Amino acid sequence: MAYSEGLAERVRELVTEMPGLTEKKMFGGLAFMLNGNMACGVLGEELMVRVGPDGYDDALEQRYTRPMDYTGRPIKGMVYVEEDAISEDDGLGSWVTRGVDFAGSLPPK
């Protein structure tokens, strides 16, 4: 599956100054990695966010989210955030921050 280059560019603008941040093609989309740990990514027109096991239930209670089920089974700690929730910069920034915060809490790979 292709990814939205426009959404990827918006994410880049939010994370470009972060040390340890890299991009990697994953899941048929583009992932943003912090010190080797996935923080978030773009798949189609949606954002994938790594919120971790403790933030998973809260993330799913938010509007326009669903479990990330790329393999056909939900991946605990990962959610898809639909386009409606990230169309505004504040919404996108909030979700990207959640992913970066979680990835930053993990030991570097």
Image (cartoon, rainbow, N blue to C red):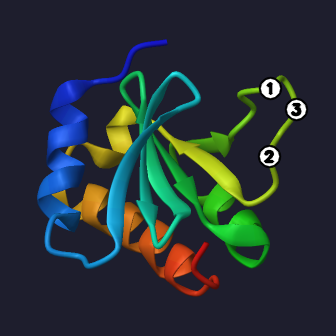
What residue is drawn where x is 29% and y is 56%?
Answer: 92
Q: What residue type is labelled 1?
A: Thr
Q: Which residue lies furthest to the right in this view?
A: 73
Which residue in the protein does label 3 denote?
A: 73
* Contact (Cβ within 8 Å) of mark 3 with mark 1: yes
Q: Which label sits on residue 71?
A: 1
Q: Which residue lies furthest to the top in this view?
A: 1
Residue 5 lies, with reference to residue 79, above or below; the image says above
- Around disc 3, counting alpha carbons within 10 Å, would you say few (fewer than 14), some (14 to 19), or many (20 or more)? few
Q: Where is residue 29 in the image (x, y as percent from the top left)?
A: 45, 28
Q: Position of residue 28 (x, y in %)?
A: 52, 22
Which residue in the protein does label 2 denote?
A: 75
Local secondary structure at mark 1 = loop
**Image position of 67 (left or right of 106):** right
* Contact (Cβ within 8 Å) of mark 1 with mark 2: yes
Q: What residue type is labelled 2?
A: Ile
Local secondary structure at mark 3 = loop
* Contact (Cβ within 8 Å) of mark 3 with mark 2: yes
Question: Distance between the Cα atoms at labels 3 and 2?
Answer: 6 Å
Q: In the rendered image, which quarter contains the C terminus?
A: bottom right
Q: Where is residue 47 in the image (x, y as percent from the top left)?
A: 43, 42
